[in-house]
Amino acid sequence: MTTPLTSPKIHSNYSPQRLTSQVGSETWTGPVCRICLRSAASSELIEPCGCAGSVAFVHRECLGRWVDTTQKTLCGICHQHYEYEKHGLRPFRECTWPHALGSYWEDEVRKEKKSYGLSDIPEVIGAAVGGSAAWYKIWWFIFALNFVYYGTVLVLVTEQWIVENTVYTFKNKAKKHR
């Protein structure tokens, strides 16, 4: 099996069109994916970074698995970051439910509020001042604070849901004149 050349600096005189690869009984001449060593016959080859020559090409799916496995979005050869392109939202049936933003501190605040009896403050104030205008002002102020708080949480959860359900693909940095 002929493998892709690993250094564009050493092998820059090699053209990807002159590279021959063989996997099993399949033989082809042309660019191959530097990860799976297969041609563009299985899926489109892209150039996600500044590498040249035979190491420039990779399948989007192979690069996605590579990035998921290594947790690195930086090419190990040319040290350029792989760029993403947005392609809209997933189909509705494939979307996930919103995830918690991290409610540990919220749970602790609620627990402390209950242990000190602070959740009963509006009722205590209402009983103390009766049905006065001051009580109504306090009630509306507390209502407005809660409205702003829960409105902000709703916006944050919605933003997180959109990010989690947006489809991203790796950008092809191939030169248009090829």
Image (cartoon, rainbow, N blue to C red):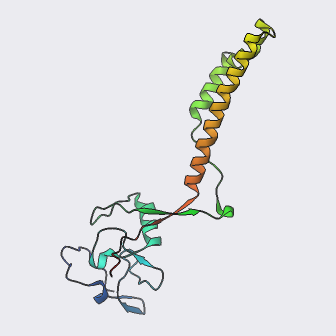
Q: How far from the left and from the top, in percent, is residue 124? A: 75, 11
Residue 100 can be seen in this image: no
Apparent side of residue 86 relative to residue 111 in the rendered image (left or right) = left
Q: Which corner quadrant holds the N terminus?
A: bottom left
Q: How far from the left and from the top, in percent, is residue 17? A: 31, 87
Apparent side of residue 113 relative to residue 37 in the rendered image (left or right) = right
* Residue 31, placed above or below residue 161: below
Q: Residue at x 23, y 73 (%)?
A: 7
* Residue 20, placed above or below residue 92: below
Q: How far from the left and from the top, in percent, is residue 123? A: 77, 15
Q: Which corner quadrant holds the C terminus?
A: bottom left
The image quarter in which residue 53 lies: bottom left
Q: How far from the left and from the top, in percent, is residue 164? A: 56, 54
The image quarter in which residue 16 lies: bottom left
Apparent side of residue 99 relative to residue 20 in the rendered image (left or right) = right
Name of the residue lying farthest toward the front: 133
Q: Residue at x 58, y 53 (%)?
A: 162
* Residue 153, placed above or below residue 172: above
